[in-house]
Image (cartoon, helix red, strand yellow):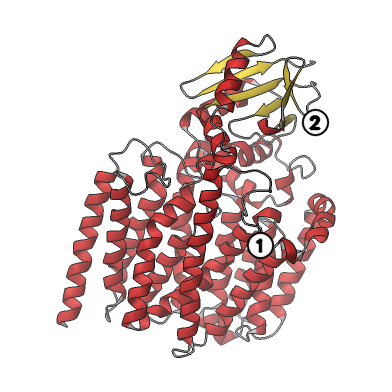
Amino acid sequence: MKNETLLLSFSKLFGILALVLWGFSLAGSTFSPDTENILKPPLLLFVLAVASLCMGSAFLWKMRTPQTRLLCLYTFIMLIMLWLSPVILQSSPVSAQWTYGIYYPNTQFISQTGGIDPAAYTFHNWPGFFILDYSLSAASGTSCLDFLAFYGPFLMQILMFVPLYCLFKNIIPNPNHRFAAIWVFYLANWVAQIYFVPQGVGVFFLICLLALITSPGFSLAQGNAVSHRVVVILVLAALTVTHLLTSVAALLCVAALILSRLVKGFNLGILAVVMVGCWTIYGAATQFDSQLPEFVNRAFELENLFQFSSAGSGGEAGAAFLQISQVRFIFSGLFAGLAVLGVLLSLKYRHRFDFPLLALEGVAAVILCSMLYGSEFWTRAFLFSLVPIAYFTVKLLRNRLSTLIMVAVLLVAIPGHLLAHYGAVSDMVSRFDVSAWQYLENYTQRGYISGGISYIKPDYLNLSLKKLSWQDGLLVGQDYTGRYPQYLQIGKSTDVDWVYYYGDSQYVPALETVLEDSPGYGLIYQNREMNIYFNQGAN
């Protein structure tokens, strides 16, 4: 009893310390973790704040009496720290540029026409997310774009917490250990996909499905209860129209759970095959026709499996790009190592969910080897490994030595998470980049776009600056025909991207100097960090 009281007192002390340190860390002017400043104030204070909160939680994990309320509070604070701090410090979540440049145009078309166009908008082959996005705006009576771009990622973590807790409640007997698994899940996740984006919503539905399948009521009724069937149909339907890869992963997860005998019979598997297969062939016919030959050509080409970086497409790369790639692989390896130790411990501490969770890890391996997502296969496979990794890692809490190892790795992983998640500076956009994007959205109708936030929309074509060269006083490339006006977004973020990817700090300043003196381009927009240069084109 004294030990329990002591652990609880230490936990509260570290919790208070975490809040104090976090408050001081917010005195910084920006949130931009990199290898040079990660262990310097104010980021060092931020790392110590999260580490203190982790220690406070670890004391509770080891207590025999359930501490659900306090652990829930600590988890909520952790989510605020890791996902709201960039917004508080006037930076942006990693997904903000995709929200503006890629996802918004898809939602805008639905808003303007009331329908979808899979031929012109590739993402409309799986329109579930965009219909949801449009519905939120319609219900609120105003555009939710800016709010979802900056606060959507944090809200997705809160939303994900609900089915995630239900899942771990079903498969992890110890109430305190369930929150340890949640910590591992969130801390290990550096893949910027569990945001308010199509795959993020898809993963939410997938975890809802897993939570339902592993529930005691589902097992008792063997999935034959009418309520279970209705919920499964609704979740699978929502999933299949939201994201291709996640729906395929859901199908493979159902197959894995049937093979592991957690799910009895084949009814659920047949239902998943029918829904995923029919939508892929008929509902997403445009994407199916265009992408199937490409996928068949690269599927299971294992000689390409060990490409060093999943973020690049080969060729030259800057030192910063390679450095973050190395951090991501090492960081992922740390958690994979913890999971392997947990698997070994499961030989001693057996549980009926061990084999089914190992089977789910097999699904991630199939996703990895299939290379369904091309150069991103490593990141997507790691995303689907998070639940098995979290499950097996918390087995280390069963004895003292392995607990020390686990907590030590989690503490080391905190700066690793910041670097792996936020260290790719090209993924971050400033409010000035957003302002430039808004100018293009409000005052242009078509054009070639280079630099800044991407603009994926019919009558707009993104041209990489890397592929452009000077010809007759214009920056042109293979896809440039001159039929549209050309807009070059040149500024701080363009320079940062160029240094990050190519290691060249001279190109963008020199380019801007040439553009300022070029008779072919005029400056039509300017803010503190971004300029837009304009060429009329043939029309």
CB under 8 Å between discs 1 and 2: no
Report the front residue among 52 and 468. Answer: 468
Circle 2 residue? 478
Residue type marked 2: Gln
- Is residue 17 toward the left or the right of residue 287 in the image? left
Disc 2 residue crowd, few under 14, some 14–19, many 20+, Cα 10 Å? few
Q: Which mark is residue 306?
A: 1
Measure how far apart labels 1 and 2 are at the Cα level: 31 Å
**Count of marks overlaid on the render:** 2
- Is residue 287 toward the left or the right of residue 183 in the image? right
Disc 1 residue crowd, few under 14, some 14–19, many 20+, Cα 10 Å? few
Residue at 31% of width from left, 45% of height from top? 40
Question: Of marks 1 and 2, which one's residue comes earlier in the chain?
Answer: 1
Disc 2 secondary structure class: loop
Quadrant containing the N terminus is bottom left
Quadrant containing the C terminus is top right
Q: Is residue 174 visible?
A: yes
- Is residue 195 toward the left or the right of residue 469 in the image? left
Residue type marked 1: Phe
Q: Is residue 63 above or below residue 312?
A: below
Q: Nearer the viewer, mark 1 or mark 2?
A: 1
Q: Can residue 171 be seen in this view?
A: no
Q: Where is residue 141 in the image (x, y as percent from the top left)?
A: 52, 36
Q: Position of residue 439 (x, y in %)?
A: 57, 23
Q: Position of residue 513 (x, y in %)?
A: 58, 16
